[in-house]
Amino acid sequence: MTGKSGYFKKNLTADSAYLSFVPADLPPDLVILSDGAAVNLLVEANKRLALLDGLVSRIPDVGLFISMYVRKEALMSSQIEGTQATLEDIFDPFIDENANQNVADVINYVKATEFAVNRLKELPLCNRLICETHAVLMAGVRGQEKTPGAFRKTQNWIGGVGGTLKTARYIPPNPEDMNRCMNALETYMNRGETSNDLDYLIQTALIHYQFETIHPFLDGNGRIGRLLTTLFLMEKRILSAPVLYISYALKRNQTEYYDRLTMVRERGDYEQWVRFFLSAALNSASDAVETVDKLVSLRGINMTAIKNAGRSKNTLTRVFEYIEKNPIIEINKTAAALDIAFNTASNAVNKLCGLNILKPVGNARRNRTFIYADYVDILKNGT
């Protein structure tokens, strides 16, 4: 069976026979966004992304905010895949000693994002970069035995636990077709601009759909596919930093997300997917703008309180800047990180508690931890 979005191909014979789906190359041969409401959605999504990018570039310590955004996207993207972890887990000061498999998945996503963003300065958005990023994502975690950093050489499928090719909900292209499809996708992502090109946000939606449909890895496809959206927007200079956490909206509408990808494959209906993706981008960007506003406001309030704290304000400022990077702290580790005496760090933490900036976590007497609760609560929205 052949349709606008591709065709089903018969593989093997007799009892071993199965049908894999081979997606049509991008761009699709049809008109996308054919009514005013959809066009307005595209315009608003672009405006909100421009606002977000401009806002982020003007805030103090932009690297800090980017770091927090990357952690939030890493957590939500991993949660879509079933990872059981919270933002507090990611900020745990004892993470090196306590990291479980779920937390390790998220930490690897953070590392993969940072790797890919830096690699994008040296390489175009190509299959080599995608594979190298996948190797970072899968290093030392679940799925590390599934050829990390290399496209699959065997057939994969999507289905329930213990499922088979016979019971699969979706079977991506076989390895030979997959390689051809990934080469075509690489070409599409790097082709020169023409007067007939679709808006970059629409192209981003199509690229994400195409990658998820090709499913070139044995594991980690969803996380790499969502990371691709940010990388493509950065490549095209729509974003200057990885500050769009698209998984915020996709996680809230997870069933619809998968259903709409399926509708493209089964019906060739690209437009409904593009509308959904644009809505997700708009909602995610709007949430990010609101988050930036809240974090900047919170920082201003707390810095004012610290400046009025008397002679200890210099030490308090150093500890405060540390907790912005590490919102859950332990005094020994804080003292070591800042190269100050334990008592100095302890006194500063007590004063920050008195200013309602820090709060103790639990009632432990040893290895006590403290949380920058207002800060974490802002970031936790959606997770």
Image (spheres, grey):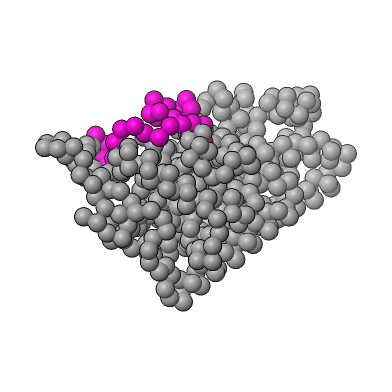
Q: Residue at x 43, y 32 (%)?
A: 150
Q: Residue 253 placed where, x, y %?
A: 40, 55
* Part of the protein shown in magenta: 133-162
Which residue in the rendered view is the most extreme toward the left?
Answer: 14
In the foreground, 294 or 238: 238
Q: Is residue 371 in sight in this rendering?
A: no
Task: Find out whether residue 180 is within the magenta segment.
Answer: no
Q: Is residue 195 left or right of 307 when viewed as pictured? A: left
Q: Residue at x 46, y 76 (%)?
A: 36
Q: Residue 284 placed where, x, y %?
A: 53, 57
Q: Residue 44 placed where, x, y %?
A: 55, 68
Magenta segment, prevailing SS (helix, strand or loop): loop
Q: Residue at x 42, y 58 (%)?
A: 27
Q: Is residue 355 left or right of 94 when viewed as pictured? A: right
In the foreground, 296 or 183: 183
* Quarter residue 178 falls in: top left
280 in relation to 63, above or below: below
